[in-house]
DNA sequence: ATTAGCACTCAACATCATTAAGTGCTAAAA
DNA sequence: TTTTAGCACTTAATGATGTTGAGTGCTAAT
């Protein structure tokens, strides 16, 4: 158990380190503690913090730097939320007001604002209503054997794709297939649709189209596109500022990770809904430090996540990826603000407005 | 005018510099010239090349490095095309064969292969038939006041967008607007459509919808999306390898440039079709060195472009962005191969196949 | 429990010498 | 006239050596 003063010392070390990026010495801390103590006293406290594993030295006579566990302790016990700066607030309101955003634009724009405000990387995800169902499927001939396939899901996702059909396929055949899909699959969850398409719908479709493989390919492609998570990432290149990577290849791997939807989804914990290992820091904003991820690449980084609830329109997520050394209270404050803001505006969008 | 041997010396300097990245000395060259001359002789030739501005010293007693003009001279006079390596060729054929690509997938896949083969950044652009015309426009109600707008261009581009309409708008009104657009604008070039929409179509639409502003916004959005160039960029992160940027901000600006469609289009010379300043190096593959662009950011880089002609289906473009020090003959060979390959496969796609 | 004082450590910086790769120039050889 | 051997000269890179300053840990006194 830490003493009151030791906590203050840890907090100050983290604060100074965030600002300067340099190891923090005992004299520096002396000047910024509320009580008046000597540097020697602080050195004693620091020794205690170090043996508790909360701070580290970069070399035997250097100042101290917060350790991974130090950050975790800070987040769990020391961090106190700050109100969002009124300048920030104004800016956000102004931007949101200046244009009316249709559909996902609001969510995309949020990522943009968040990354600009923090200079980190922002990731947002539109609201998704539980399980997505197939609402409709259409094929329209465009002439010249090109066909437009159009797929609509209950969550309002619309995906279109054009393809060219073999000359052996006639309009009536397409019509028939379309009817089969609409009769058999509409209303079912996308996953089910995919399964059935691969199993007992094949014979049904084969009645109309001789070799349906290529057709199934097309439908598959559309389905997975429709059901894929639609991430909006902004400020990707800010990683270059904060990840002081010695190795270019690591950096490339990191970017690859972010650009790969599955991996990003895993990072954001989208696939394990019972991820209650870390309780919400406050209001459902959670912070996960890089070293807590299985992936080595995220060392010295930190991911701050928040879920927003747009009522019946589903839940979405916003997140900030940045260095583990960052002004947490500000960033958490911002995310918390955006949770509310997005929840409200999205609900508004579908309800009052139009 | 350079002597025969001076040319050879320049060529060898460039070759060695490409391989090692280090300044090249007279003794190194001595070992790799076809004729037997002493290093002193080569030093004389080098002095000549230097006063011609084709090579440079990094410091007063260093070896030589090709200069910007040196590269230009090399490209214009010394470069001799090489056949594409049979390994590369096999790989390309294999990848293209293993799957049937619909629509733009072929073009996107080409970018991927090119960037993987070269370790540089590849940019491809699908075939575009001269001026794009509006082929059709549809609005379909999705229920719950959500409407799906669907726009089709003559080039086969299909864009969809969902939006929410105010409760004051009825289905009949939408129907009417849709009819107006289809009656008045179908068959016209997108640019004309945009203009007319903003000018003499406003009163016409206002007859049906009271405040058509928001509606015009939506249509505008779809139109510009449909008419925008669809670049496929692959290997973006390879820039980190070859652009040894000291300044992170420059790097970020460079990425911004690439990610901004207008700027990228300008870079590729898409807006000045009479860009005949640099004659094709061979078969229509052109090389532009970074310092030849107005933009400072591209210093020490090089852009190799090729246009492919998919017959009546239009023209497209492929390009490689890399360091000015690169194995030009290989890269040019690859681009030249892809020109043919793409042209043929795209034509095939629309004609024979389905 | 706190503090003054002091010996100690180590990165960062500067100075200096050494080395190796490369040049330009001169005068002789081809 | 062109080529070459030879040599003095330049410079980046490397490594050894010393100095400084910020910081620590420990001890003994408060």
Image (cartoon, coloured by chain):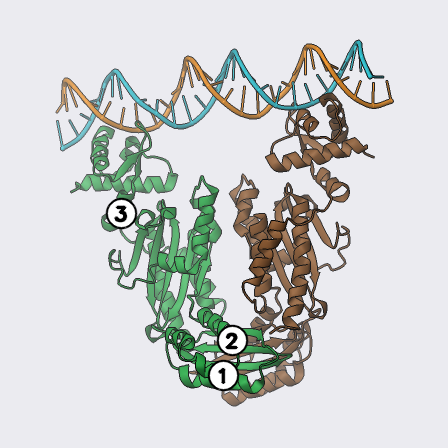
Chain colours: A green, B brown, C cyan, D orange
x and y, in percent, of residue A51 in the image: 21, 35
Rendered location of residue B270, percent (x, y)? 69, 59
Q: Residue at horizontal 34%, vertical 35%?
A: A23
Picture disc at residue A72: 3
Around disc 2, counting alpha carbons within 10 Å, would you say few (fewer than 14), some (14 to 19), or many (20 or more)? some
Classify mark 1: residues with Cα within 10 Å, few (<14), some (14-19) or many (20+).
many
Q: Residue at x 66, y 60 (%)?
A: B341
Callout 2: SS:
helix
Q: Is residue B188 above or below residue A106?
A: below
Q: Earlier in the sequence, mark 3 or mark 1?
A: 3
Q: Which mark is residue A177?
A: 1
Q: Which residue is mark 2?
A: A215
Quarter of the figure with residue B242: top right
Give whichever of discs 2 and 1 has the lower sequence position: 1
Place of residue A93 in the rendered image (x, y in percent of width and height, measured from the top left): 43, 63
Circle 3 — which element?
helix
Q: Give how far apart the Cα atoms at labels 3 and 1 are.
A: 56 Å
**Do marks 3 and 1 share a subunit?**
yes
Q: Compared with residue A249, is residue B189 higher up or lower down, i.e. above or below?
A: below
**Tag in front: 3 or 1:** 1
Parent chain of label 1: A
Give the chain letter at badge 3. A
């Amino acid at each position: 158990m830490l003493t009151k003063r030791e906590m203050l010392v840890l907090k100050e070390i983290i604060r100074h380190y965030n600002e300067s990026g340099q190891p923090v010495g005992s004299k520096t801390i002396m000047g910024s503690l509320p009580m008046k103590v000597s540097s020697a006293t602080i050195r004693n406290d620091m020794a205690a913090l170090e043996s508790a594993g909360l701070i580290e030295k970069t070399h035997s006579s250097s100042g101290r730097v917060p350790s991974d566990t130090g950050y975790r302790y800070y987040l769990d016990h020391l961090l106190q939320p700050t109100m969002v700066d009124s300048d920030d607030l104004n800016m956000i309101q102004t931007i949101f007001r200046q244009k009316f955003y249709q559909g996902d634009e609001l969510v995309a724009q949020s990522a943009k604002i968040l990354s600009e405000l923090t200079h980190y990387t922002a990731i947002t995800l539109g609201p998704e209503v539980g399980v997505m169902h197939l609402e409709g499927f259409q094929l329209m001939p465009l002439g010249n054997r090109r066909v437009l396939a159009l797929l609509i899901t209950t969550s309002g996702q619309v995906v279109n794709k054009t393809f060219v059909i073999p000359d052996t396929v006639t309009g009536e055949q397409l019509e028939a297939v379309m009817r089969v899909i609409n009769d058999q699959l509409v209303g079912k969850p996308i996953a089910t649709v995919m399964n059935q398409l691969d199993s007992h719908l094949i014979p049904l479709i084969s009645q109309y189209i001789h070799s349906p493989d290529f057709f199934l390919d097309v439908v598959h492609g559309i389905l997975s596109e429709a059901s894929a998570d639609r991430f909006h990432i902004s400020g990707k290149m800010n990683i270059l500022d904060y990840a002081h990577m010695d190795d270019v290849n690591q950096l490339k791997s990191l970017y690859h990770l972010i650009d790969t939807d599955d991996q990003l989804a895993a990072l954001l914990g989208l696939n394990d809904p019972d991820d209650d290992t870390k309780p919400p820091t406050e209001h459902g904003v959670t912070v996960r430090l890089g070293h807590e991820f299985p992936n080595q690449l995220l060392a010295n980084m930190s991911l701050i996540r928040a879920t927003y609830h747009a009522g019946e329109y589903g839940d979405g997520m916003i997140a900030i990826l940045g260095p583990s050394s960052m002004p947490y209270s500000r960033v958490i404050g911002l995310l918390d603000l955006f949770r509310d803001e997005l929840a409200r505006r999205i609900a508004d969008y579908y309800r009052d407005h139009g």
